[in-house]
């Protein structure tokens, strides 16, 4: 009995997700000002957070904002990683 190999089709990324977005001036201070997809914005934000040690040491889900991130987070000193994506979305056009 020969087993038939199933062909796996590569999952296509959502086009809206991959569309380059323009960051606001506040967000551009953190990630740069060239247009990039949302996925790349999140990646750059996490690089910035890790580089500057902004992840809360006790609760890793929280991010402690520095002055540049505070502008992006609407003046909040600490936000959860889920809240962060919502707040960052307001800075993308």
Image (cartoon, helix red, strand yellow):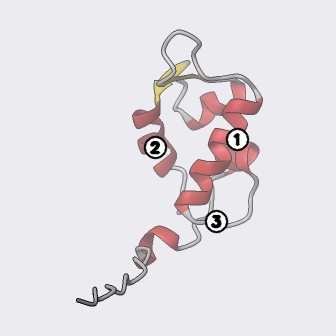
Discs 1, 2 touching: Cβ within 8 Å: no
Q: Residue furthest left?
A: 1
Q: Residues within 10 Å of mark 2 (few under 14, many from 20)?
A: some
| Residue located at (52% from left, 32% from top) | 74
| Near-viewer residue (60 or 5) | 5
- Label 1 belongs to which residue? 47
Q: How many marks?
A: 3
Q: Residues within 10 Å of mark 1 (few under 14, many from 20)?
A: some
* 70 sits left or right of 82 in the view: right
Per the rendering, the mark at residue 88 is none
> Which is nearer the N-term, disc 1 or disc 2?
1
Q: Position of residue 37 (x, y in %)?
A: 57, 65
Q: Is residue 35 above or below residue 69?
A: below
> Which is nearer the N-term, disc 2 or disc 3?
3
| Residue located at (61% from left, 58% from top) | 40
| Near-viewer residue (55 or 12) | 12
- Label 2 belongs to which residue? 85
- Label 3 belongs to which residue? 36
Q: Residues within 10 Å of mark 3 (few under 14, many from 20)?
A: some
| Residue located at (76% from left, 27% from top) | 52
| Near-viewer residue (89 or 37) | 37
* 37 sits left or right of 35 in the view: left
Q: CA distance from mark 1 to mark 2?
A: 15 Å
Q: Position of residue 93 (x, y in %)?
A: 53, 63
């Amino acid at each position: 009995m020969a087993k038939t190999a199933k062909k796996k089709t590569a999952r296509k990324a959502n086009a809206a997700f991959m569309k380059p977005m323009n960051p606001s001036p506040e967000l551009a201070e953190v990630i740069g000002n060239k247009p990039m997809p949302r996925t790349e914005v999140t990646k750059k934000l996490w690089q910035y957070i890790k580089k500057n040690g902004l992840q809360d040491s006790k609760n890793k889900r929280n991010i402690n904002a520095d002055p540049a991130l505070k502008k992006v987070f609407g003046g909040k000193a600490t936000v959860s990683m889920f809240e962060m994506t919502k707040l960052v979305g307001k800075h993308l056009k």
